[in-house]
Amino acid sequence: MGSYRHAAVHSAGGSVMIEGSWSIWVDPLVYAGLLVTVGTAIGWIWRRCVRPVLHMAKDWHGTSDRPGVPGHKGVMVRLAEHDEMLAEIRDQLTPNGGKSLKDAIDRIARHMGLDDAGQ
């Protein structure tokens, strides 16, 4: 970084050219500021864009157990379990010859003398 020389400024056709060792393109403070700006932008993009996508992907696929941290199932596994539970509920609400909740309610209603109109 030696000593700074005075810059010579030339105007040629309306544009200004700066000559010398301290021009804005060589100044170490400008490079440091540029690095800080770029680093900040990359950090912001990481925090606001990339990290949430990675968290969503981890939630989508699920995680296995780690020491001290229980794992969790992925979205597709949980949806399959919900489908199975809904099928069981639907089976209980549909008459199937005596073993469903619907059949039991119908038997109780007949025993009490109630018809389907709810009298």
Image: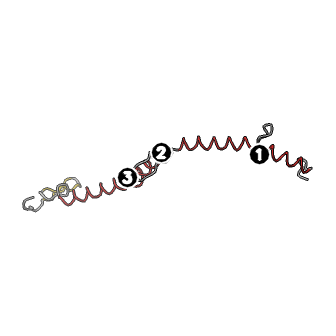
Residue 101: give its label. 1
Q: Position of residue 36 (x, y in %)?
A: 27, 58
Looking at this view, name the residue that lies furthest to the top: 97
In space, the residues marked 2 and 1 are separated at their CA atoms by 35 Å
Can you tell which quarter of the image residue 22 is in? bottom left
Query: Which secondary structure lies at badge 1?
Result: helix
Within 10 angstroms of label 1, few (less than 14), some, or many (20 or more) residues? some
Residue type at the position of mark 1: Leu
Q: Choose the circle earlier in sequence order: 3 or 1.
A: 3
Query: What amino acid is at disc 2?
Result: Gly
The answer to whether 75 is drawn above or below residue 7 in the figure is above
**Residue at (54, 41) in percent of width and height:** 77
- First in residue order: circle 2 vs circle 1: 2
| Side (left or right) of 61 relative to 11 | right
Query: Residue 16's spot in the image, x, y percent?
Result: 20, 56
Q: Nearer the viewer, mark 2 or mark 1?
A: 1
Task: State how many labels appear.
Answer: 3
Of callouts 2 and 3, the N-terminal one:
3
The residue indicated by pointer 2 is 62
Q: Which residue is mark 3?
A: 46
Q: Is residue 42 left or right of residue 85?
A: left
Q: Quadrant of residue 87?
A: top right
Q: Nearer the viewer, mark 2 or mark 3?
A: 2
Q: Residue furthest left?
A: 2
Q: Residues within 10 Å of mark 2 (few under 14, many from 20)?
A: some
**Horizontal and vertical percent for residue 73?**
51, 45
Q: Nearer the viewer, residue 17 or 11?
A: 17
